[in-house]
Image: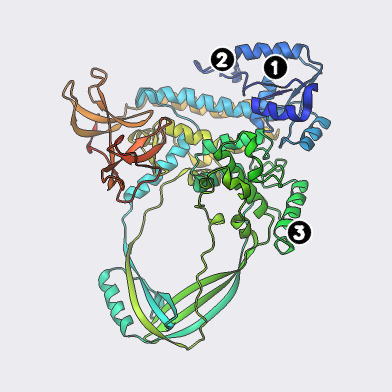
Amino acid sequence: MIVESPTKARTLEKYLGDKYQITASMGHIRDLPKSELGVDVENNFEPKYIIPRDKRKLANQLKKVAQGAKTIWLASDPDREGEAIAWHIKELITAGKSSNNIRRVVFHEITPEAIKAAFEHPRTIDLKLVDAQQARRVLDRLVGYKLSPLLWQKVKRGLSAGRVQSVALRLIVEREREIQAFKADEYWIIEVELEKSPAETFRVTLIEINGKKADVKDEKSAKEIMAHLQKSAYLVDKVAKKEVRRYPYPPFTTSTMQQAGSNKLGFSAKKTMNLAQGLYERGLITYMRTDSFNLASSAISSVRGYITSNFGPAFLPKAPKLYKSKSKNAQEAHEAIRPTDINRLTNTILSMGLNRDHIRLYDLIWKRFVACQMMEAVMDQTTIDVLANPGDYLLRATGSVIKFEGWLKVYKQSLKTSFESKLSNSVYGKSADDEEKEESEKILPELTEKEDLNLLQVLPSQHFTEPPARYNEASLIKKLEELGIGRPSTYAPILSTIQERFYVERVERRFIPTSLGFTVTDFLVKYFGDIVDYAFTAGMEDELDEIARGERQWRPTMKSFYGPFEKKLIEVEGTAEKVKVEVETTDKICSECGKPLIVRFGRFGKFLACSGFPDCKHTEGLEEKVNAKCPDDGGDIVVRKTRKGKTFYGCKNWPGCKFASWTKPKGGNPETTVDTKAQI
């Protein structure tokens, strides 16, 4: 049996015993060459696959092992990438000839039941899925290897362009320009604190003046209204009570798991996927690359039994909850991401070689799956309308009380038990997402209509409209999914690439385009607007899905794309002028040649370099100051980087002061020594 990873191999060995020799291919055994295009565009886009140098020894071992095997089972992952890996291995060990002793087996979870079912229903390699993977690989290679050299020529050496990464970058750049163009408007919110009795006070908010929406634009208007409200009498106009139901979220798909990993645990999409891969290969969760909400009937039956036993019959719906994917291309044969055994709690997997973050992600998946099959939460919501002056001003208060916890209870139930003594409580961080956030119970006093109320104080507050928020990993993945761009396996690489290429910075977990990111996007939009068009990119994803379903051939699809693309490349190469990348200059002078120092990007973030490069190669560190003081010794707080490039905030007086924080201390935005910008 050949699988992709040693971890998966070890898990399978526990179930299959010594009757099978299980070995790992370590991912793809063949690939397109890095040093050349590797696609013969004149020969119907024939890919040129090679065995990379670091895989040659392993490839020879696989061929040797396969020669003496009675049957060869190809058990790579159950998606297009896994199907392509199986096909490449088959091509390697058979030298392209047919073989009757090769079987393809797939399972969406590594459990005895799933493995048994897979062996009872082996199949041949699905060439439609292989073609879809080849089409994506060839398409991305054509765009990357043809467009990147043009960027080198017209913008700056060392740049790269990608079919989907460039679209993701465009979203970030366009959002940043919205923020830059945004003009804040002042507005005021006016609250009034009232009392029914000294022990029963509450606040109401002004919502209408003379029957029209309260739109208080400035301090002068706010003071005039305050003066009226301070002289007003208050009485209850209306008391409305209704029951509100809050329904559980669907089980995780790849994108929603990545979003939750970012929002709740602070993980990058890449880290979330790596952790999920580890959980899957240890047999703890189902396959983690999926866009389906489908759940196996056996899993639903198991979780319904768990809910009844641990929460009570009142928490169990009469019928299982079924969720329908919004994605028109969702592979319903796949399952959503769930635990393989609902009775395997967090505290029972400590001995499986997992780290703290594996366990945090498993806990997230476990809770989401259990909650999705529970009853909805029920709340009693009360709305109180209050009239002032009388009738000129309408003020309102809304409060809600949880009447029945329903699925919210699973997030309040502690799974720690003996786990607490073995692992820090910091594993269970407070959630930043709605589904785990405890409902705030704002309880209002019991009031009757026409009841008089006493004024305690008028509380005005000044506000300003805010620009749209910058994208973080979660919101960018959500936007890409809404646009139909990318697929479960592509989100993490997209986000990693745009950061590794220094097209964006991640500050406070949000993406800010660099000057290089702005320049590259502007160039691509100007000359290759169709390639980075949202609808076009989504349409290409649909065509790849059609290839996977056997409704379209991949080579004609490449031909229809490449013809116009090549023509445009030639045109732009001959007519487009070289563009300049705007760089940040500083007031510092190079100590070696006297020229100004400018801000550059490197592996560990920003640094200062001589503007006379390459004649002068002088560099210096760049401190980004935060408008805050160290709580330990009062020193300045500066932005620092870990060895892996992750941002944190530390005291400038290190190593004398050891203060460090992952979150920016309060006090302002990061400042650098940058004073001006220049065209270089």
Three-letter residue code for mark 2: Asp
Q: CA distance from mark 2 to mark 3?
A: 53 Å
For label 1, the residue is: 91
Q: Residue at x 37, y 76 (%)?
A: 192
Q: Residue at x 18, y 25 (%)?
A: 595
Q: CA distance from mark 2 to mark 1?
A: 19 Å
Q: Nearer the viewer, mark 1 or mark 3?
A: 3
Q: Is residue 48 above or below residue 668?
A: above
Q: Is residue 315 above or below residue 501?
A: below
Q: Quadrant of residue 11?
A: top right
Q: Is residue 544 visible?
A: no
Q: Given contact means CB atoms under 8 Å apart, are the residues at marks 1 and 3 in contact?
A: no
Determine the secondary structure under disc 3: loop
For label 3, the residue is: 319
Q: Residue at x 54, y 48 (%)?
A: 428
Q: CA distance from mark 1 to mark 3?
A: 48 Å
For label 2, the residue is: 54
